Amino acid sequence: MKRITLSKLKPGMKSVITGLLAKGGIRRRLQDLGFVEGSHVDCVGISPLGNPTAYRISGTVIALRSEDASQILIQEVDTDV
Amino acid sequence: MSKNHSIVKNQSVTKLAVEKKSQDDKVIALAGNPNVGKSTVFNALTGLNQHTGNWPGKTVENAQGYYNYNNQNYVLVDLPGSYSLMARSAEEEVARDFICFGQPDAVIVVCDATCLMRNINLALQIIETGKRTILCVNLLDEAEQRQIKVDLDLLSERLGVPVVGTIARSNQGLNDLMESVQTTLQAPPPTNLIVYPDFVEKGIETLLPRIDSIVGNYLDARWVAARILDGDQNLFNSIEEYLDYELIEDPEIQRILKDYQFKLKDKQITQIELKDTMAKTFIQVASVLCHDVIEEPLIASDQRDRKLDKLFTSKLTGFPIMLIILLLIFWFTISGANVPSDLLAKVLFGFEDWLANAAISIGIPSLIIDLLIHGVFNVIAWVVSVMLPPMAIFFPLFTLLEDFGYLPRVAFNLDRFFQGCDACGKQALTMCMGFGCNAVGVTGSRIIDSPRERLIAIITNNFVPCNGRFPILISIISIFLVGSNSGFSKSFLGALILVLVIIFGVGMTLLVSKLLSKTVLKGIPSSFTLELPPYRKPQIGKVIVRSIFDRTLKVLGRAIIAAAPAGLIIWLLNNVQSGDTTLLYTITDFLNPFGKALGMDGVILVGFILGLPANEIVMPIIIMTYLARGGLLELEGAALGQLLIQNGWTLTTAISTLLFTLMHWPCSTTLLTIRKETQSWKWTIISFLVPSVAGIAITFLFNSLVRIFI
Ligand SMILES: Nc1nc2c(ncn2[C@@H]2O[C@H](COP(=O)(O)OP(=O)(O)OP(=O)(O)O)[C@@H](O)[C@H]2O)c(=O)[nH]1
Ligand SMILES: [Mg+2]
């Protein structure tokens, strides 16, 4: 179980959020979308040119650019559950 | 100086005013996350046709309609979607402002049953404002498909507000919804469920008396106090706008706030921790509320959507599929429009003759016949026969894509390019809206959070051809560029060239966005989130009917309104003598050298200039002018190519006109919309100049190259 940022999460991998680094308005927006400590977030796909990436969070899919995903701290969890 | 009396409402409240039919009408707002079915509920209750589509950000403006239930009249206001009352974009501001300052009697919060918790977060924020609230849990059919169950009764009990389950798309549950609205209006407002941790509550408590004395008559004081601690500057701006008071600058409030911040420092609590605590309180309350209310399978139930995403957004297939879809849409449009266009032309021009003969036989002066029938009616006939068939095919096809949920995937695929231009990926969505109508694309730019990136999207929207310009492109392509091929292969080649033209337009959009980012609109790209909603089976019948009646006929109507005076002007110009020629000759001859330098001629330029009110009339004006100059009065449909060639059109003329069609000034409707959206003449003028200069530069360059090499 490594602590990494969300931008490192590969498609098919699951994780739990451990913290937010984002500042300003986007911080609250991420929180309102469910990106808060303890939430599960999975990587579900990368766009054809490699950025942005789509994540499953609180029952929906949200795409983030890697700059923004790297502001979210996560802990990877085992995929086989 | 602090005012000690309660404030007076500001004039700009009228901006939010609803039109009641009578004083007793109740105003109900429809709020909720984006793309949850608010407009669908609105349409079902009011019988109106607000546009719906399967992508977040379809509604960017308030719309209002009426319904009657149990002898009570209601005014229903459809709001843009928002994730939070902490507005980040112009569309979210519109929604927040109406909920908070528009004084609705109640708010229906429409929720997506498949991701209820996130929706409840917004509902809690709205309940916190003290408004009477009804929860409408929509999309129950999708929830059932995904084996998600919601205990509506338990939720209602815990929330203390009525909860109604609906499937708005098939009109289910709407009676219960109206019933709940009625009972809610008679009940007291809901009690607040949000209790922050102690140190926050203390802050609210100290601010409360002062806030209550200032805005207590209009807003829930506790809610405002909490937002002051939250530091929601965007809200303070709206308070100033609507209540005419700089609340946050109030000396007393400033003093209390400073005091409070000292205390926080003592406890070693940072401003960010304070804000986080407040944001998390909502999430926690929502999650406690939803415990046992939502029952869902352990494994994510969106497998089908993810498979489709693989198809539409993977490295291998994402772009090819995008191009194929675009190609197919245009192929259907071009090949399908051909026959009906000719038929319409035959019928309408036949009718023109009949009308003229009939008019002569009843003794109407020939001047008036010329003016109204051969002038005005003729242009209208051109517009209808050239415009109607492609629009009637293109709009429904495009709407089907929209309803299916494909557009957000386009934005997802293309975002990397926009990153490269320091712009927002949602600009791809406003570009798509521009295909229909650039004015719609400009208004739609409200979905873009950052004002800088929104301006870029507005200024560059004109680089995608709107529906008014497609027919010009299509006729030029099929007359001059696809050669002697016939039938299906001809229309396929035509579609292919059209796709290339559009790719060129997108390329220009990116290039100009980049230039703007490096010059007048300098800045770093802002953070952005893009929701990829579930794919939905499009409602084919509804889509066809709606897109023909709402979009096609509306756009066509506008074109006809613009065409009639244009026909009149051309006729007049051609009949007013100036020296020994007509005024029309004088003008086109004057413009000719400019036109020639750009590979076109004076007549074509006159077409673009008189076409300012609507691009739909550019081609008819060009045709009319050639005919008038040639002394002819009418033209059989198929002879268009002949007419152009007779008037000196070559392949170079065709390509130059094609390029200029893609890049010239926005139509007047779009310009007025830009003025309205930016509130600035400066940006309106820039939006006029940017595509015009680009078009002039590129056609000039193209022709210089042609002259050198050929
Ligand atoms: N299956 C299903 N689809 C629905 C239902 N209600 C709405 N839809 C579809 O959901 C999509 C979004 O509906 P809209 O009414 O445009 O949503 P909105 O909340 O107004 O969206 P914004 O204006 O963008 O915030 C459309 O494709 C609707 O046809 C429903 O109960 N069941
Ligand atoms: Mg809507």
Image (cartoon, rainbow, N blue to C red):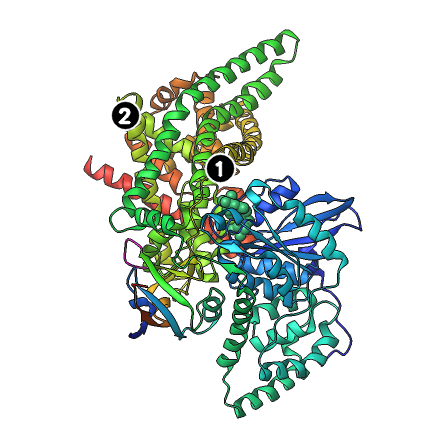
Q: Residue at x 72, y 48 (%)?
A: B74
Q: Give amino acid for label 1.
A: Gln
Asked whether, in this view, residue B567 is left or right of residue B702, the answer is right
Labels 1 and 2 within one chain: yes
Pointers 1 and 2 in contact (C-beta within 8 Å): no
The residue indicated by pointer 2 is: B489
Magenta segment range? A47-51
| Residue at the top extreme, as displayed | B361
- Of callouts 1 and 2, which one flags the residue occurring earlier in the amino acid sequence? 2
The residue at label 1 has a CB less than 8 Å from ligand 1:
yes
Does the magenta portion include A49?
yes
Helix, strand or loop at label 1? It is: loop
Q: Residue at x 56, y 26 (%)?
A: B572
Callout 2: chain: B
* Disc 1: CA contacts within 10 A as few (<14), some (14-19) or many (>=20): few
Please state the horizontal and vertical placement of residue B488, each as a whole percent of the image. 30, 24
- In this view, the residue in front, A47 or B158, is B158
Please state the horizontal and vertical placement of residue A53, each as a whole percent of the image. 33, 59
Image quadrant in which the C terminus of chain B is located: top left
| Residue at the left extreme, as displayed | B709
Q: Residue at x 43, y 16 (%)?
A: B636
* Disc 2: CA contacts within 10 A as few (<14), some (14-19) or many (>=20): few
Helix, strand or loop at label 2? It is: helix
Please state the horizontal and vertical placement of residue B54, each as a whole percent of the image. 47, 46
Image quadrant in which the N terminus of chain B is located: bottom right
